[in-house]
Amino acid sequence: MDMRLIFLISFIISIIIFSYLARKLYQERSAELWVKVSHIILLVLGFLMLLDGFLFEESVMKIFGLATVSAAASLFFMHHIESENRVKRILEAIFSAISLGIITYGYFITRSLILGVATLFIFVMFLVALILSYFLPKARPHIRLRKNG
């Protein structure tokens, strides 16, 4: 049997098992525990994609794996390090930018359609976020953000 087929079948089975366990965990426990578990899972999936890219010599999987690991590192700094230090915030931003930069750079190097779509999606989401952050306060000036406290 082909190694790709074995890997695909085991990946699908693990997604099904994970979905069931995640649903049970989220229903029975607090959402905070679910956030911690999801960050670990994101990191593991990133390493698996990176490993798959190296084993089968697929540059797209290497790129997505590196981007996912970098995004997981940014999430780790954001949610698990309790500090308001400027260095922590800079590291969060750097890892986020690296994650997005890896996908964009990967598209320009490989000219892969899937990376092109991902790059286009990223830029459209940034554009939408900028437009909404500019127009929403002007459209609804009576809505104020509540401070936590």
Image (cartoon, rainbow, N blue to C red):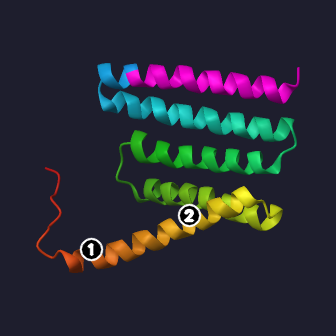
Between 120 and 41, the one nearer to me in the picture:
120
Q: Which residue is mark 1?
A: 136
Determine the residue located farthest toward the left in the rendered image: 142
Per the model, the C-alpha gap separating discs 2 and 1 is: 21 Å
Q: Residues in magenta?
A: 1-23
Task: Residue type at mark 2: give it.
Answer: Ile
- The N terminus lies in quadrant: top right
Residue contact at pointers 2 and 1, CB within 8 angstroms: no
Image side of residue 111 versus residue 93, left or right: right
Above or below: residue 70 compared with residue 89: above
Mark 1, residues whose alpha carbon is within 10 Å: few (<14), some, or many (≥20)?
few
Q: Which residue is mark 2?
A: 122
- Is there any visible trace of residue 101 in the rendered image? no
Helix, strand or loop at mark 1? helix
- Is there any visible trace of residue 13 in the rendered image? yes
**x 36%, y 43%: residue:** 82
Going from the N terminus, do you reach mark 2 or mark 1 first? Answer: 2
Task: Residue type at mark 1: give it.
Answer: Leu
**x 49%, y 36%: residue:** 39
Between 128 and 92, the one nearer to me in the picture:
128
**Is 18 a magenta residue?**
yes
